[in-house]
Image (cartoon, rainbow, N blue to C red):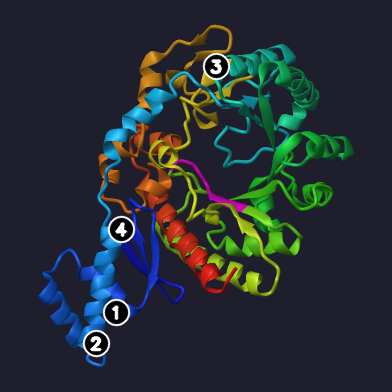
Amino acid sequence: MIHPYKLGGYNIVLDICSGAVHAVDELAYDLIAGFESMPKEQLLSDIAQRYPAVPAEEIAGCYAQIEALRDEGQLFTPDTFAPMAGKFKEKSAGVIKALCLHVAHTCNLNCSYCFASQGKYHGDRAVMSFEVGKRALDFLIEHSGKRRNLEVDFFGGEPLMNFQVVKDLVAYARSREKEAGKNFRFTLTTNGMLIDDDVIDFANREMSNVVLSLDGRKEIHDRYRVDYAGNGSWERIVPKFQKLVAARGGKNYYMRGTFTHQNPDFVQDIRQMLDLGFTELSMEPVVCAPEDPSALTPADIEIVKQQYEELADLMLQRDREGRPFTFYHYMIDLAGGPCIYKRISGCGSGTEYMAVTPWGDLYPCHQFVGEERFKLGDIWNGLDNPEVQSEFAACNVYAKPECQDCWAKLYCSGGCAANAYHATGAITGVYESGCELFRKRMECAIMLAVARAAEGR
């Protein structure tokens, strides 16, 4: 399978199953387009009529190069991965590498678009005790097999509302690393309201990454990210974020925003973040019910797709000016990864990655917390819902019939199981608007990589 497209002045041909990316001229682009569907002589004749100024031997030479790329497995590579899809997860069955610790099912903001129901996850407000968190870390060590590197996300709600437990859990994990033969990497996600010097010092010492919630422009951010009195949070958090990022040397953080029906022109929010001095950025589409006022409409989707192109142009412009920045969804490694396991199996939710509630229940990921049918067990008694475990173990890109003819399937790995479930009622369903945006992001990200390579960056 190939995917040819034109963007940013480049003719790009993706060979889906090999991962090869080709930037070609118009002649090669048109030859590749007809290579499989037309007999050779007919295609050469048609191309000769369309390119009368190009000598016949040059057209034939280009055709021969395409044949060589095919024979080398760089074009029209057959899909041989389907038989592997179920086997990959079988090999790692029972091995957990990451936990999302919900240390606080409560929040000091009242964001109406919050998928977590203002941090409560459709239940009661609660905070995780040290004893529950300690057992969760022990559970992770016990079920991590031979894996050395383990990941723990401190999540909420707002995790800094339970900051002492966060600190105590990190200290406990560090105390167990050597004897257990493990290395913990911690991430903290925060809305910033409770950041102070103690938080900054601790985060810079212990957190491999910090995710900071900012929606960009003040008027956009303050529309949704308000406290319980209805006051916006932008002016209170931005100086704290700037101080934390400066103390981290501008590295190992992400400024994560959400765009909604109110700001499909999200590149303006990216520009605001850049003006504030932030350069490690992410903007995500809102996840909510279609009838929600913040939901993206079909017209918004078209605006967002154009914004992705504008964003790629902005990144190239800033590269040339010596002021580069990172956008999370445009981070791709065309040469080395991801591995085929990740391309087929996805994020590992429900198998390698799980979320832990404040009272120790286990769910496939943070977006399933509160959905009782997806409860996998708990950290004391282990996993006891084999039906759901099997459902997630079998969830891969080849388990979704709608994905089979999609050129982006080995880039998205079948997409987010939670988004699929909330959109269709099945984790093997397809969240169509999410797919549409993902394909556009990938086209822009690959074009950006091609342009950077062409410019020697």
Q: In the rendered image, which quarter is residue 386 located in?
A: top left
In which quadrant will I find the N terminus?
bottom left
Dot placed on the residue nearer the N-terminal end, 4 or 3: 4
Residue in the foreground of this view, choosing between 339 and 231: 339
Per the image, the residue denoted by label 1 is: 27
The answer to whether the residue labelled 1 contacts the one labelled 2, judged by CB atoms less than 8 Å apart, is yes
Name the amino acid, label 4: Glu
Asked whether residue 36 is in view, the answer is: yes
Q: Give the CA separation, mark 4 to mark 2.
A: 27 Å
Per the image, the residue denoted by label 4 is: 72
Q: What residue is rendered at 27% in x and 43% in y?
A: 80
Q: Is 284 inside the magenta-drawn segment?
A: yes
Per the image, the residue denoted by label 2 is: 51
Q: Give the CA separation, mark 2 to mark 3.
A: 62 Å
What stretch of residues is rendered in magenta?
282-289
Up/down of 151 relative to 434, above or below: above
Q: Position of residue 309 (x, y in %)?
A: 49, 67
Per the image, the residue denoted by label 3 is: 143
Residue 149 as seen in the image, left or right of residue 312: right
Name the amino acid, label 3: His
Q: Is 117 inside the magenta-drawn segment?
A: no
